[in-house]
Image (cartoon, rainbow, N blue to C red):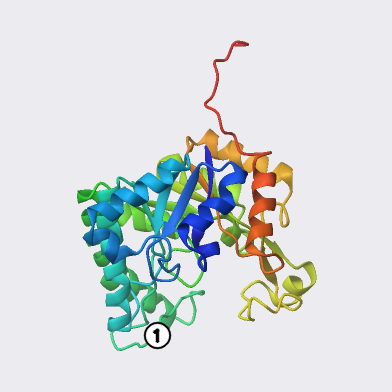
């Protein structure tokens, strides 16, 4: 496995400065945003598409630091019912696939997206229950009329470019748990898989270690290292579907945390061991969204913590068996 970071946490700094900041940490990879929600401060999408010299310079800069690009990230909502919004996000995604192919990057990270309730809707509609029956009708429309047709086409396009699309399962989008991820993969193609982020599973009550086993190593393309913590009092009173602002930490049912501040070293050791068990030995990319810490401190603490539990080297021979 290789340890790196999503550079969006330092979006206010140029890439050269970011690489100087992380140099002492001894990382192996960087994940670069190319637009939509992560922005593209370190990988300006259109500039790189238009210029081979700029692509070569980016690769040389990364390689010169002893790093590699683990993925390009364009998390967005290409299925948004606002057609202009969806078109913009879909273009970024399509162009990110093209750029990944040109750079030799095998994986792009994205969300699955979420349509509206019907063709006339203006806003996304994330269904969370099966009754009244209107909600099952919405799901039928979303999956069969929007989700599967779109991703069947995009999966084929990505495959043509030698690229895999890794979905970050996230509430608010149609893919938010292992079941919905595998449903989309089965319907649309095996070059669709997971950007596995345990933080989003924790607060839903999903055990990420069991989710790794359910998804399987073939379908896990990339892993985010991010923790979350459910507040035992707030969560037990109000449940975990929480719409309060992330900055209202004292009253929220859960918050994102730096790795080790939500779950123990023992848990994370089991997590990485299970990833290896199912055959995953790819990038582990730190995503900082801990509102209690600066990006610098959150990243540093995460690196120190994760180096204790990630399995870096290939398996050795079983001399004892």
Report how many numbered discs are placed on residues in the image: 1
- Badge 1: few (under 14), some or many (20 or more) residues near its Cα, within 10 Å? some
Residue 26, quarter of picture? top right
Q: Nearer the viewer, residue 91 or 232?
A: 91
Q: Nearer the viewer, residue 228 or 302?
A: 302
Mark 1, residue position:
123
Q: Is residue 155 above or below residue 128?
A: above
Lateral position of residue 76 relative to residue 1, left or right: left
Q: Position of residue 112 (x, y in %)?
A: 39, 65
Q: Position of residue 317 (x, y in %)?
A: 54, 15
- Residue 207 in sight here: yes
Lateral position of residue 168 relative to residue 310, left or right: left
Residue 92, quarter of picture? bottom left
Which residue appears at 51% of the width and 41% of the height?
Answer: 28
Badge 1 element:
loop
Q: Position of residue 136 (x, y in %)?
A: 41, 75
- Residue 220 in sight here: no
Q: Position of residue 262 (x, y in %)?
A: 71, 57
Q: Is residue 215 above or below residue 279?
A: below
Quarter of the image for the C terminus: give it.
top right
Which residue appears at 36% of the width and 45% of the height?
Answer: 60
């Amino acid at each position: 496995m290789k340890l790196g970071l999503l550079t969006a946490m330092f979006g206010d700094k140029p890439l050269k400065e970011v690489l100087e900041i992380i140099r002492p940490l001894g990382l192996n990879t960087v994940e670069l945003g190319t637009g939509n929600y992560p922005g593209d401060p370190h990988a300006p999408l259109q500039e790189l598409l238009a210029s081979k010299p700029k692509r070569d310079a980016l690769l040389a800069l990364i390689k010169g630091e002893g790093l590699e690009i683990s993925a390009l990230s364009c998390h967005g909502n290409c299925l948004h019912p606002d057609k202009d919004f969806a078109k913009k996000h879909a273009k970024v995604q399509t162009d990110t696939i093209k750029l990944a192919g040109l750079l030799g990057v095998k994986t792009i990270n994205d969300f699955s997206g979420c349509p509206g309730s019907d063709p006339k809707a203006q806003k996304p509609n994330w269904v969370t229950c099966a009754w009244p029956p209107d909600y099952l009708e919405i799901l039928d429309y979303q999956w069969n009329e929007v989700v599967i047709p779109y991703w069947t086409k995009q999966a084929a396009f990505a495959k043509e470019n030698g690229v895999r699309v890794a979905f970050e399962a996230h509430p608010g989008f149609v893919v938010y748990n292992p079941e919905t991820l595998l449903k989309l993969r089965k319907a649309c193609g095996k070059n669709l898989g997971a950007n596995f982020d345990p933080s989003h599973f924790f607060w839903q009550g999903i055990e990420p270690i069991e989710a790794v086993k359910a998804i399987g190593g073939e379908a896990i393309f990339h892993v985010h290292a991010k923790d979350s913590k459910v507040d035992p009092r707030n969560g037990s009173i109000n449940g975990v579907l929480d719409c309060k602002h992330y900055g209202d930490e004292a009253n929220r049912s859960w918050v994102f945390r730096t790795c080790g501040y939500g779950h123990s070293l023992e848990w994370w050791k089991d997590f990485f061991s299970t990833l290896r068990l199912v055959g995953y030995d790819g990038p582990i990319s730190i995503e900082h969204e801990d509102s209690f810490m600066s990006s610098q401190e959150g990243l540093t603490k995460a690196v120190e913590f994760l180096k204790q539990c990630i399995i870096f080297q290939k398996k050795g021979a079983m001399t004892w068996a």
